[in-house]
Image (tube, coloured by chain):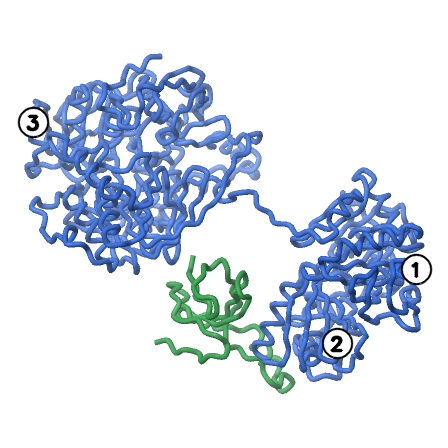
Amino acid sequence: MLIIKCPWCGERTQTEFSYHGEAHIVRPQAPDELSDEQWADYLFFRKNPKGIHYERWLHAAGCRRFFNMARHTVSGEIYATYRFDEQKPIIE
Amino acid sequence: MTQDNRLPAPHGLLIDRQQTLTFKFDGREYSGYAGDSIASALAANNVWLLSRSFKYHRPRGILTMAGQDANTMVQLPDEPNVLADREAIREGLIVEGQNYNGSLTNDRDMFVQNFARFLPVGFYYKAFYKPKRIWENFWEPYFRKKAGLGKVNEAAQEQYFDKKYEFCDIAIIGGGAAGLSAAAAAADAGADVILIDENPQLGGALNYARFDVEDSAAAALRQQLLDKIAGRVRVFSNAVCNGWFADHYLPVICGNRLHKIRAKQCIVAGGNIEQPLVFHNNDLPGIMQGSAAQRLIKLYGVRPGSRAVVATANSAGYGVCLDLLDAGVSVAAVADLRTDPPPHPLAQAVAERNVKIWHGHTVYEATPTAGYRHVSTAAIRPLSGRGTCSSGGDTLECDLICMSPGYMPAWQLPCQAGAQLGYDDTRAAFTLENLPQGFALAGAINNSTTLAAACRDGRRAVATLGYSLTTENNDNTSDEEAEEMINTDWHIFPHPRGKEFVDFDEDLQVADILNAAADGYDHVQLAKRYSTAGMGPSQGRHAALSVARLLASASGKSIAETGITTARPPFAAEKLGVMGGRHFNPERHTAMHQQHIALGAQFMPAGLWLRPAYYGEPHARQQCIEKEVLAVRNNVGMVDVSTLGGLEICGSDAGEFLNRIYTGSFTKQAVGRTRYVAMCNEQGVVIDDGVACRLHEQHYYVTATTSGVDNVYRNMLRWNAQWCLDVDISNVSAAWAAVNVAGVKAREVLQRAGCDIDLSTEAFSYMAVKTATVAGIPARLIRVGFVGEMGYEIHVPATFGNALWQALTAAGAEFNIQPFGVEAQRLLRLEKAHIIIGQDTDSMSFPHEVNLEWALAKNKPFFVGARAFEIVSKRPLQRRLVGFSLPADSPKPKEAHLVISGEAMSGRVTSCEYSPTLNKIIGMAYVTPQQTEIGTTINIRTDGGVMAAAQVEALPFYDAEGARQKL
C-alpha cells in the first residue's frame, strides 16, 4: 500500500485517498465546435500508459482536496504530487 | 496414555513439565505439557498418524514441525484445518482428524490410491464428461464430498478479532541468528526496530539445530544476542508476517490481532525452508525433515523414533544424526547423496560414534508397516546417475527417516517485494536478486549459513540500509570456514511404482509433473494450474524446488529459466475473522433518533444513516405504512428528512456555477425562490437531484440525495478546481436537521408551533423559501411538494433538531399529526411520479428517458453533460420510464421484475406499491418507446413466473394539476 504525499497534508497512507483518472484533461472551451467523435475522445479516451502516468487523486479522508500525481504504472513509484495550479513536472 | 517418547530435560525448551494438560484426539484421551503443540504432545504419546492426504487418503504425519505443511491439519470443534504442529494444546481440547471415511487409522477411501494411474494429472479436464451432464449430476458432487478437508462449524462461537497500527524504522522478519544480530546492530545505530518471528521463542535455528559437535555454540550465541536486544527492540513472537505490500506495509498476524506495520525499511531474515527427498513412499508417517526431528527433540523433548535412517547431502544431516544419538535414538545408517563430501567436524563426530555412513547413496524407497500406518524399512541404494540407483546397498528396519537433502530460501516475501529468483548452478541453489529499495536480506536466506556468517550478514544488512554501524558491529573479517554447499543438484528418485511425492498437499507424484510437461504444460505457471502443484495449503514451500528441477529437465531449459510460480500474499493461511477485524459498522443517527425509537420506529439503512422505515410492529408493517400514507393525504404528517444532503454555494459566481453544474437555469432565479435541480455527469447520465434555494443574490442552499451528496460535493470541487469561479462550496449536510410537515393541516400545525412569518399562500407560495423562527428555533422554511401535499420543509441547525421534532409533535397533537417513515414517503412520491435517483434511474439513464426534458435549460451556454446528451438525443430513444397500474387484487410486481414482450424482455420495473389512496397497484417501469402510449398493456413477470398485465398510465397518478401542494 503506497504512501502518498498530499500537497497540503504531507505523507499519508493510500487508504485515505481515492483515484480519479488521468489528469490534465481540460474540458474543451467550445464543446459545440467539436465533432461528436472529438467529444467522445474527450469523454472516453485515455492514455493508459505502461510507464509514467499523470493522474488525479483526491485526499478523500483528509483535506478532501484534489491534486495531481506522476506515477509509474508498473512499479507504482510516485515521482511527484502537485497542486492543480502547479506546473506539470517533466519526468525523464 | 503415558508419554513414552518424552525425553528428560534439558530437552524441551518450550514445555513446562510442571503443568500436565489432558486433551482428546480422535476420541482418545492423551496428556501433554503446557507449551506442547498438538503434534508434539501426540508424538510424545507415540501417535504419529495425524491426517489423511487430500486425494489418495494416505496416512500422513509430522513433516516439518514448523507449521508449514498440510500433513498436520486437524479439526477443532470450531475450526477446521488447524496446524497441529503450531496450535498449542489446552486443557480439555478436543481434536479430531479430518478428511477420512471411517476412521483416521482405517480410512476406507485409501483404496483410491490403487486407481492412481487412472487419475492422471489433469484428469478433471480429461474425464467425466460423458455421458452428458454426468459431471454436474454425479462426479462433481462425488468429488466435492471426497476431496474436501475440514468441516466448518456454522454454529461456532463468535470470536473477538481486531487490528492495530504500528510504525517503525526497520521491520526485521525472522528472529534467528541473522535477524537478532540485525536487530541488535540496528538498535545500536539508533533505529526504531520491530522484530517479527513466527515462533513462540526467538532464536530460530539456534533453538533446535546443531552447529558444533559439543552443541553449545547455538545456545550461547542465542543468549548473547537476546541480551543485546533486550528492552531496545519491539518483539512480536508467534507473529506471521503474511505479505509485503508497497512502501513496506506489512500485515502481521498475531493470534486474533492483525498488526498493520508501516516500516521505513525491511530486513527479511526468514531463513531456509528444508526440502524433502523425493523417493517411493516418502510421505509415510515417521518420515520427516531432519529439522523436524530436531525440533521434536530440542523444543518439545520428544524422541522422534527409536531407530533412524538419515538421508542427507550436507553437514546439517550429520547434526541431526548427533541429536538423534544424544536423544537415545539408534541411527541405523546415514545415506549421504554426495560421493566425496568435504570433511566436516559433524560428519567426523558421527563416524566416530560408529554410525554406518553410505556415501553416494540415497534412500530409494520406504515400506510401510502392516496397516500402512508408519514407516518400517528404508532401502538404501547406490546412485548410478541423476535420479537413478543401481542394486546394492541395504534395506534397514527403521521407524524414522530424516531427510536433509537441501533448502529453498524463504523466497515469498522478497519476491512479493519485487526481488527476482535466480539459480546458482555451482551451489545448486536458488538465489534472490534485484532487491527493491530499502529492502535487505540477512542470514540463511542470503546463503549465509554458518553462525558467524549469519551474524555478520545481519549487521551488513543494517549497513546496506544506510545506517552507520558502531565500531563493534563493523567487522570486516571474512569467514575463515568456507561457505558450505548445502544443496545437492538432484534429489528426486522416480520409482516404477510411483508414490514418490513431490507435493504432499496435493498428492502429486513425479509422473504427474512429467505428464503435465508432456501434455504441453511445461511452463512453470501452466504446470501449476494444470497439475495443482503448489496450490495446497503449504503453497509450494516443499515442492517448488522439485517442480522446478523436474520441469527444467523435461523441457530442456535451465532451472533459472524455469523458475517458480509468482509468490503472492498471503504467506500462510489467514482467517476471515482477521481480515474482518472488529465488527465496526459506523452508523449515523439524526438529531431526532431517540424520538423515533420512542415512537416504535423500525429503522432501515440509507447510506450510513439509519432512517425510520415506518412506525409500529413489523407484523403490521403494511397497515402501519398505509395508515401513515392516508394521514398525509387526508390530514397531516411529519417526516424526518435530516439525512438529505445540504450544500452552501456562496460567492459572486454562485448562479453561474449552478448553471454549469445543474441542468436548469439559475441566474434569473429570484431570491426567496426554490427550483428543482438535476445533475448529469459528463456522459449525460442523470446522477443526482434536489432543490436549489436562493437565499441571497450570492447564496444558494442546495439539497442533494442522502447517498449522493458526498459525490455531488466532490464533483463540485473537482469542476471548480478547473473553472476557478468565485464561489465557496461547503457540504453542510450534518449541520442541518430537517422535518417535512405535509398535509392539508400543515400550515395550522406550524402556526400552532409558533412561526414568526405570514404563512398564507399569498405571502409564502409553493416553491418559496424563507428564513424564520419556528417554535423559537431559527429555521429555513422551504415549500416543496415531494409527497404531493402542501408542506413545509423546516431546516434547522442540527442542535435544534430534537427540539423542533418535539415542538411539532406537541403542536400537532390536536391535529392528530402522524409521524411517517421512508416507506410511506416512497409511496407518496410514487403517486406523484417523483423519481428517486438510483432507484428509478441507473448508470445509463439519460434525462429524456426519465421524463426530465423539462428540467434542461436551453438558453444557457452549457451544463455538464449537455454536449453528450445532445449526441445521445439524436439517436433513437431506447427506453422510457412510464407509469403503470394494476387492479388491487392482481399479483404485485416488485422492483427489477421484467417487462416481457413475446419471448423477449422489453423493460423492467423500478418502483411498485399498492396505493391505498387510489386503491390499486401503481408503479413505474422502463419500457420500449412502442409501449409508452397511455392504455398500452405491458406484461410483467412477477414472483414465481406469474404474469401480470398492467396498463400504461399517465403520470402522475395523483393530483395531476399539482393543486394540493400549492394550497
What letter labels the chain drawn in green? A
In this figure, which residue is indicated by the disc labeled 3?
B351
Between the C-alphas of marks 3 and 2, the distance is: 95 Å
Tell me, yes or no, whether the two marked residues, 3 and 2, touch with CB atoms within 8 Å: no
Confirm whether residue B571 shows in the render.
yes
Amino acid type assigned to the residue bearing label 1 in the image: Glu
> For the residues tagged 3 and 2, is the chain the same?
yes
> For the residues tagged 2 and 1, is the chain the same?
yes
Above or below, B479 against B938 in this view is: above
Residue B664's disc number: 2
Between the C-alphas of marks 2 and 1, the distance is: 33 Å
- Secondary structure under tag 2 reads loop
Q: Residue at x 44, y 44 (%)?
A: B258
Considering the image in quadrants, where does the N terminus of chain B appear? top left
Q: Chain of mark 2?
A: B
Q: Earlier in the sequence, mark 3 or mark 2?
A: 3
Confirm whether residue B522 shows in the render.
no
- Secondary structure under tag 3 reads helix
Please identify which colour was used for chain B in the image: blue
Amino acid type assigned to the residue bearing label 2 in the image: Gly
> Label 1: few (<14), some or many (≥20) within 10 Å?
some
Residue B748's disc number: 1
Find residue B742 and report its horizontal and vertical position in percent: 87, 59
Tell me, yes or no, whether the two marked residues, 2 and 1, touch with CB atoms within 8 Å: no
Q: Of the residues tagged 3 and 2, which is closer to the observer?
A: 2
Find residue B932 and report its horizontal and vertical position in percent: 83, 65
Count of numbered tags: 3
Amino acid type assigned to the residue bearing label 3 in the image: Ala
User: Looking at the image, which is closer to me, B290 or B231?
Assistant: B231
User: Looking at the image, which is closer to me, B682 or B693?
Assistant: B693
